[in-house]
Image (cartoon, rainbow, N blue to C red):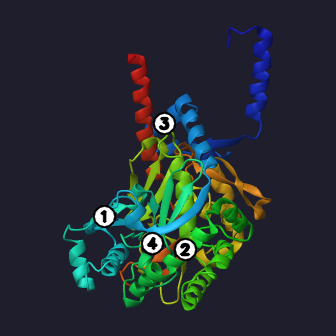
């Protein structure tokens, strides 16, 4: 400093004198010890709680590698474009064994990432017991449980077979499934039919009432709906879902509008069926009394869109979030068939009378494919009444939709939210943005009792733990670094 010209030096000394002679207001970012030293001398200091993204220097450096990386940016643009271009079409109903790819003999599909019988939670075990009885593989719960643990039945995630299942997510060979086709990409997605709320197979119940309902769905409802779709022709799901958002649905835990719109499309052709009029009446009554009937179709529609975005090398876009009650797993476009997993989160919610959090199983189900596609909890602002079911306030719902915008790659103009001035939904969950911000994706979900055979006991909110996204970031970083090294060698 003493080497500066005299005029500069004098001006600098004057400014520093004014600075240190005035009251200082310090902002301390990160290490709090500095703030303690200032405050102990009577200084005004504001502490900003900050740590490196991902909690470590290594993760921060890898994040820096992937942000604005040409390969990653190009891949994400491609994946997001393919998601936006997806156009789901409801084309039919058939038995799972007829259409679901890779469905082997004595196979059951389940929700979430891969898991073996010994590690499964009790609600999933209960649903498997029910499926074995439904398929006539066993005549009692004891026999079904023995069969399931014998190794004679193979278990596989729904997501690995172009399918999705709510809660336990069990799909057995005889179960009828909705068939949804992406008109632009040509890929298909499948889901079972919704049984309603309460004591149902997907929540781990398996008594005679549950089995009888499944038999009725297979032998009465599914044939009627299959015939109806053949007469009416395929149904475009995008416009129907967009309209339902404007009517107060978020297309995960609130679907009465979408169910009503679907029923409006199906009813004219359903009532002209040549089948027994009593059966037609029972079909209409079942669908009309089940506000969640559209949920499984919504899931298949979102699955068809996210599968269109899957498998793009170097992409950090999340294409599936799924839980099996023990583990939660994500699939990322650029990681192909790899699952990245962590412990399944607990659920903060509202419980039916007589139950509380001590009775609850950790989160489970493939229905979070709706959040993955920008719906469900990401669009909660469209469904203010949902808070009466999952807890919170309408302000919370609006805030959640806004907050999720910070971890997504873009907007989907096909779906807009009236309560946010018709703002488009945010979609394209980006692994990088979650690691950078620390914001965890939100899911609204049902709550299953931790014991099998009981069923649903409430509904609420869970979050996808940030650890899975940190792991995914590291895996994609390895791929990118390998590509960089290969280019140098080349």
Labelled pair 1, 3 in contact (Cβ < 8 Å): no
Front: mark 2 or 1? 2
Tell me how far mark 1 sits from mark 3, CA to CA: 30 Å
Q: Is residue 234 left or right of residue 456?
A: right
Q: Earlier in the sequence, mark 4 or mark 3?
A: 4
Where is residue 444 shown, x and y percent of the image?
Answer: 56, 68
What is the secondary structure assignment of the residue under circle 4? strand
Q: Quarter of the image holding residue 201?
A: bottom left
Where is residue 39 shown, x and y percent of the image?
Answer: 63, 47
> Which residue is depicted at the point 57% across and 60% down?
301
Quarter of the image with the C terminus in it:
top left
**Is residue 405 positioned above or below 14 on the image?**
below
Residue 344 visible in the current orientation: no
Tell me how far mark 2 sits from mark 4, CA to CA: 13 Å
Where is residue 284 shown, x and y percent of the image?
Answer: 60, 84
What is the secondary structure assignment of the residue under circle 1? strand
Give whichever of 486, 284 is nearer the camera.
Answer: 284
Q: Which residue is mark 1?
A: 155
Q: Which residue is mark 2?
A: 227
């Amino acid at each position: 400093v003493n080497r500066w010209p005299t005029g500069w030096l004098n001006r600098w000394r004057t400014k520093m004198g004014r600075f240190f002679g005035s009251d200082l207001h310090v902002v301390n970012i990160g290490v709090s010890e500095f703030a303690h030293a200032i405050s102990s001398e009577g200084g005004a200091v504001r502490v900003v709680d900050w740590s490196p993204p991902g909690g470590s220097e290594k993760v921060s450096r890898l994040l820096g590698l992937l942000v604005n990386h040409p390969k990653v940016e190009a891949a994400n643009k491609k994946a997001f474009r393919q998601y936006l271009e997806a156009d789901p079409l409801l084309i039919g109903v058939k038995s799972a064994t007829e259409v679901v790819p890779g469905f082997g003999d004595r196979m059951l599909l389940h929700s979430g990432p891969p898991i073996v019988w010994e590690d499964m939670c009790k609600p999933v075990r209960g649903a498997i017991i029910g499926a074995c009885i439904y398929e006539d593989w066993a005549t009692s719960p004891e026999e079904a449980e023995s069969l399931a643990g014998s190794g004679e039945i193979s278990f596989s995630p729904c997501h690995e077979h172009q399918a999705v299942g709510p809660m336990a997510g069990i799909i057995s060979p005889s179960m009828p499934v909705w068939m949804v086709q992406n008109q632009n990409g040509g890929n298909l997605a499948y889901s079972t039919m919704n049984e309603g709320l309460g004591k149902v197979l997907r929540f781990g119940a398996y008594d005679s009432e549950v089995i009888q309902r499944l038999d009725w769905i297979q032998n009465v409802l599914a044939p009627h709906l299959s015939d109806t779709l053949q007469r009416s022709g395929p149904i475009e799901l995008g416009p129907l879902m967009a309209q339902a958002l404007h009517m107060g649905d978020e297309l995960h835990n609130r679907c009465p509008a979408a169910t009503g719109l679907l029923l409006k499309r199906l009813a004219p052709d359903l009532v002209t069926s040549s089948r027994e009029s009593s059966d037609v009446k029972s079909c209409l009554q079942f669908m009309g009394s089940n506000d969640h009937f559209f949920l499984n179709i919504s899931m298949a529609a979102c699955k068809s869109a996210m599968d269109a975005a899957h498998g793009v090398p170097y992409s950090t876009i999340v294409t599936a979030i799924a839980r099996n009650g023990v583990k939660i797993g994500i699939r990322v476009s650029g990681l192909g068939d790899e699952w990245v997993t962590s412990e399944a989160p607990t659920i903060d919610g509202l419980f039916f009378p007589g139950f509380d959090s001590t009775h609850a199983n950790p989160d489970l189900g493939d229905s979070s494919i709706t959040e993955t596609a920008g719906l469900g909890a990401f669009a909660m602002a469209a469904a203010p009444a949902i808070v009466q079911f999952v807890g919170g306030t309408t302000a919370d719902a609006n805030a959640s939709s806004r907050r999720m915008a910070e971890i997504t790659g873009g907007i989907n103009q096909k779906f807009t939210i009236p309560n946010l001035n018709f703002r488009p939904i945010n979609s394209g969950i980006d692994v990088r943005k979650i690691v950078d911000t620390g914001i965890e994706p939100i899911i609204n979900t049902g709550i299953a009792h931790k014991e099998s055979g009981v069923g649903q006991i409430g509904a609420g909110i869970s979050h996808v733990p940030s650890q899975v996204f940190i792991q995914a970031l590291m895996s994609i970083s390895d791929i990118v670094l390998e590509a960089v090294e290969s280019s140098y060698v080349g």
